[in-house]
């Protein structure tokens, strides 16, 4: 038995050694895995800490941004005010215009419209039969100060807007006894309505610029209009409908207030006839995009005179007037600071639409019939922005009137003293030291010529300051 034990002891000792070796190896592997787990856990904790720090930083920055936005929102002035369900905005500008003009053909009387702005029909012409000397005049005026009210009402999916615009230039002025001031004392002037309209969805009702033209072609100028000779410029009551045809393409149709401005042979003064039967009908097709816009407009109207006298003294006649015009504004840079603007118009019986009624719609002859008058009008302007504060404008405008062959152009009993042609060129420089202030200087040369070739010209220098609010 002792012998068997002695023989088995070496085998048991070897087995025990093998188990101890395996156990040591397993312990070593376990320690290695634990160490690896500890390393991964530490890395995970570090990553979690970094993520938490990043998230906290993001929250902090978000809070700062929100606070900044709130501060900016609080410091930004609110536009307009609420009145029930309507938001009302008051805007406008205050403008001072100082001008010095030299007339070659005599004097343009004080306190007339031609002294406030460039009006080609008011330029005096030199007549050798009654010679006059050139004159120079200087005027200061704040009449062109303007303000407007813009109201918008929420009505479900409908768009309802109202717009009213006033200034002190449009009114002709009342006698001093009725409140009109004089340049000698108070310089008080009447407030006059320029535009007053309602917009409901695609419809417009009220007084606005004629649909025969787009006022966006008007140039930047110290003058009230700027290059009026060849421009369509009329504000009148109308009903207008705007129909979108496709992306950027819109058709505007309007029925507008009729008024025939006639002259009588031997008497170039214009007469407003109130016996019109049919409204002036206009249509304008506009294509607008990032490049600017292009317009094609047409006008159809009835010209009519009726002196309402009895028997053989009764004069009544009518004829058709028509016109076609193309205009546009093309941007020259991405900021829309520079552009070119143009308008070309031709037609018959459209005198009151051009150049602030430079010529008549028709001429009443001694036989009681209206003779036709045709007009050609051209306008162009270029605007170049030197930078965000300085810009330059160049303006050119022209109008030519063609009278019917039945009218006598040679005698004062005919149309010899009627306007035949007007043109002007101008250049200006504008500076905006801050966003809402414009300072400008402008030089303009304009000429007027009659049918008998008598003519006169004006050289006008303007300085303007305007604050927009």
Image (cartoon, grey):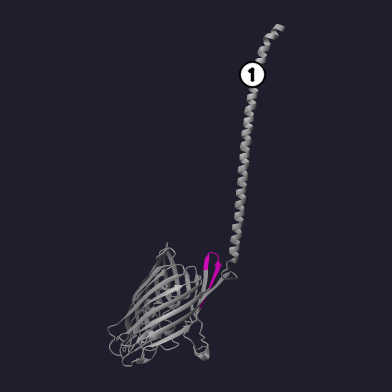
**Residue 463 visible (yes or no):** yes
What residue is pinned by disc 1?
A: 18
In the rendered image, residue 378 lying in the magenta stretch gets the answer no
The quarter holding residue 99 reads bottom left
User: Going by the picture, which residue comes out furthest to the right?
Assistant: 2
Q: Main secondary structure of the magenta part?
A: strand
Q: Which residues are magenta?
A: 146-159
User: In this rendering, would 251 be left or right of 9?
Assistant: left
In the rendered image, residue 149 lying in the magenta stretch gets the answer yes
The quarter holding residue 350 reads bottom left
Front position in the image: 460 or 299: 460
User: In this rendering, would 33 be left or right of 452?
Assistant: right
Classify mark 1: helix, strand or loop. Answer: helix
Query: Residue 252, percent across and down?
Result: 42, 69
Front position in the image: 170 or 372: 170
Query: Quarter holding the N terminus?
Result: top right
Front position in the image: 323 or 287: 287
Question: How many numbered circles does the render carry?
Answer: 1
Front position in the image: 104 or 167: 104
Q: In the rendered image of this protein, does residue 400 appear above or below residue 40? A: below
Query: Residue 5, percent across and down?
Result: 70, 9
User: In this rendering, would 460 be left or right of 200?
Assistant: left
Q: In the rendered image of this protein, does residue 446 appear above or below residue 296? A: below
């Amino acid at each position: 038995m002792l012998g068997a034990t002695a023989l088995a002891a070496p085998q048991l000792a070897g087995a025990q050694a093998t188990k101890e070796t395996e156990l040591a190896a397993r312990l070593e592997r376990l320690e290695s895995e634990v160490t690896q787990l500890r390393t991964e856990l530490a890395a995970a904790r570090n990553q979690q800490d970094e993520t938490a720090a990043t998230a906290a930083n993001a929250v902090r920055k978000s809070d700062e941004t929100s606070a900044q936005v709130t501060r900016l929102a609080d410091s930004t002035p609110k536009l307009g005010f609420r009145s029930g369900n309507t938001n009302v905005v008051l805007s406008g500008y205050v403008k001072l215009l100082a001008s010095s003009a030299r007339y070659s053909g005599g004097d343009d009387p004080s306190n007339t419209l031609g002294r406030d702005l460039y009006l080609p029909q008011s330029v005096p012409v030199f007549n050798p039969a009654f010679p006059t000397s050139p004159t120079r005049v200087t005027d200061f005026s704040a009449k062109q100060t303007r303000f407007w009210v813009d109201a918008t009402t929420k009505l479900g999916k409908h768009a309802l807007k109202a717009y009213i615009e006033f200034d002190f230039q449009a009114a002709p002025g009342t006698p001093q006894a009725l409140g009109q001031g004089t340049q000698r004392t108070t310089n008080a002037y009447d407030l006059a309505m320029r535009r007053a309209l309602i917009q409901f969805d695609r419809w417009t009702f009220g007084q606005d610029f004629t649909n025969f033209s787009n006022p966006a072609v008007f140039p930047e100028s110290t003058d009230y209009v700027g290059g009026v000779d060849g421009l369509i410029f009329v504000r009148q009551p109308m009903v207008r409908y705007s129909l979108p045809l496709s992306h950027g393409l819109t058709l505007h149709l309007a029925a507008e207030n009729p008024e025939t401005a006639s002259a009588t042979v031997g008497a170039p003064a214009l007469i407003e006839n109130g016996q019109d039967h049919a409204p002036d009908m206009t249509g304008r097709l506009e294509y607008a995009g990032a490049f600017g816009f292009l317009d094609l407009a047409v006008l159809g109207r009835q010209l009519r005179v009726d002196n309402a006298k009895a028997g053989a003294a009764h004069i009544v006649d009518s004829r058709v007037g028509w016109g076609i015009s193309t205009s546009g504004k093309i941007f020259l840079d991405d900021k829309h600071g520079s552009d070119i603007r143009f308008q070309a118009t031709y037609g018959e019986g459209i005198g009151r639409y051009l150049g602030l009624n430079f010529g008549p719609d028709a001429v009443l002859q001694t036989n009681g019939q209206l003779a036709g008058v045709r007009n050609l009008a051209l306008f162009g302007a270029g605007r170049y922005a030197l930078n965000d504060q300085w810009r330059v404008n160049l303006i050119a405008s022209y109008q030519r009137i063609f009278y019917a062959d039945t009218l006598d152009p040679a005698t004062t009993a005919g149309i010899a003293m009627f306007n035949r042609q007007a043109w002007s060129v101008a250049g200006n420089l504008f500076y905006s030291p801050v966003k809402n202030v414009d300072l400008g200087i402008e030089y303009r040369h304009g000429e007027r010529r009659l049918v008998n070739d008598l003519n006169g010209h004006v050289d006008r220098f303007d300085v303007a300051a305007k604050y927009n609010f």
